[in-house]
Image (cartoon, rainbow, N blue to C red):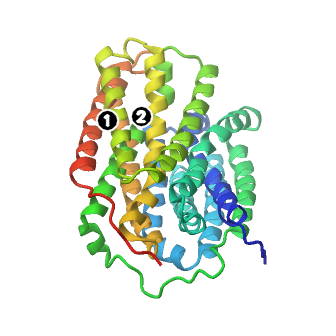
Amino acid sequence: MIKIQNKWVRAAIPALLLHCSIGTVYCWSLISGTIVDYLNDHGTAVSKSTIEWAFSIAIFFLGMSAAFLGPMVEKNIHRSSLVAAVCFAVGLAGTGLSIYLCWVPGIFIFYGAIMGIGLGTGYLSPVKTLMLWFSDQKGLATGLSIAGFGLAKMIASPIMEFLQGSVGIVAMFYILAVFYFILMFIGHLLLAKPEGWVEPQETQGGSVLDIFKNRAFLGIWIMFYINITCGLALISQEKSIYLAIGLGSGVIAVLCSVTALFNAGGRLGFSTLGDHLKDRNTVYKIIFALSIALTALVLVTGGIKNQYTVLVVLLLIVINACYGGGFSNVPALLSDHFGMDAISRIHGLCLSAWAMAGLTGNQIATLIVNNTGEFVDGVNPVGYQNVLYFTLVMYIIAGLVCVFVVPKKSQVKEQ
């Protein structure tokens, strides 16, 4: 048993190992087209819109497993982190096997359900531990970890592109399954709460119904849901949007890594900013103000249709940063209102918003793109522009909730 008692070794590093692994789920746009091509080339006719459900199911199971397994994480982070490592690796390997067998339901089961459970438990496992070790800098702590989730896309994108080209999509999944299991298992071995911390016998927060009746929780849940829905709507179309404004594949690969870097930077930057504000909810006011302003600017100028490259790239950079910042501030914002005793449970319930957004965000975007405008050379600039109208309305609603529904920071006495 590892005896080291250090906040970096026992909290920050294992959290990064876990989140930098599971965060590769956001590389979906880089592999979904290759999966469709492989299946069609091997006699299984399937559309990209059908395969997109694998990603939606993965995000749904992420959120719902976090919501239902929150109590398990609260009691035993070692069990939950091991469950995460096993489910994530099995999900990757099973996806590769399903593609090889041209078994589409298997892709939904392994990439969606099984890997999704690994995502949810892996995402939730280190969060409370980080806030316990970094009690005076909760935003920085959770930002470091959750930044790893965003950073994963930047790290994994070129690796996955290389593996697809060199060994093929099936072997890529097998290789990633082994590699990420090793990383997550090391994180599992290192992760530990501070010595002497004893979980309370009775947790705060009341029943699930009571929590959802709480004004602060409901407002945070709605903000979280909208920020993710809008983020997924745009991130899922990112590669196609770049093609629509005339960028080549080489430039697109670089920009996908750049936006991933800003996603990670937003997670760390916005959460650290929250540590220095009297009311952490101010961070969300900034996030939604930036998102509304830039989305409106691109719409007014017809940025995607008119191929205003710099403006469109700036939009996707800012949306990625705000999307990430919305994630990293949630645990600390919840702890401001509910304390630390049951934070894994309450955070898990809040992540159900992620589950709902996973079923709606990229699916709504796909629906809009497929039913408005026209495809020219495989892209639909008008359709992507219409997705922006949807996200603008949603961001405005989120901004109103942020200002008028979520109360100021509660004074919660922590143990």
- The one nearer the camera, 377 or 16, is 16
Identified at 38% across, 79% down, the residue is 204
* In the foreground, 125 or 400: 400
Element at badge 1? helix
x and y percentages locating residue 378 in the rendered image: 46, 21
- Indicate the quadrant where residue 8 lies: bottom right
Name the mark on residue 391: 1
* Residue appearing at x 65%, y 52% in the figure: 21
The residue at the point 47 percent across, 76 percent down is 71
Give percent across and percent down for residue 198.
56, 83
Q: Quadrant of the N terminus?
A: bottom right
- The quarter of the picture where residue 349 lies is bottom left
Position in image of residue 291 (x %, y %): 36, 34
Q: Is any part of residue 224 visible from this angle?
A: yes
Identity of the residue furthest to the bottom in this view: 201
As drawn, is 50 to the left or to the right of 194?
left
Q: Residues within 10 Å of mark 1 (few under 14, many from 20)?
A: many
Q: Is residue 342 above or below residue 272?
A: below
| Residue nearest the viewer, comparing 75 with 277 | 277
Q: Percent from the top left, x then y, of residue 44?
A: 54, 40
Foreground: 141 or 247?
141
Q: CA distance from mark 2 to mark 1?
A: 8 Å
- For marks 2 and 1, the one nearer the N-term is 2
Task: Mark yes or no: residue 237 visible.
Answer: no
Q: Amino acid at mark 1?
A: Thr
Q: Secondary structure at mark 2?
A: helix
What amino acid is labelled 2 in the image?
A: Leu
Instruction: Say which residue appears at 50% left-offset and 14% top-offset.
Output: 246
Q: Report the residue marked by disc 2.
A: 234
Image vertical order of residue 184 relative to residue 377, above or below? below
**Do labels 2 and 1 touch, CB within 8 Å?**
yes
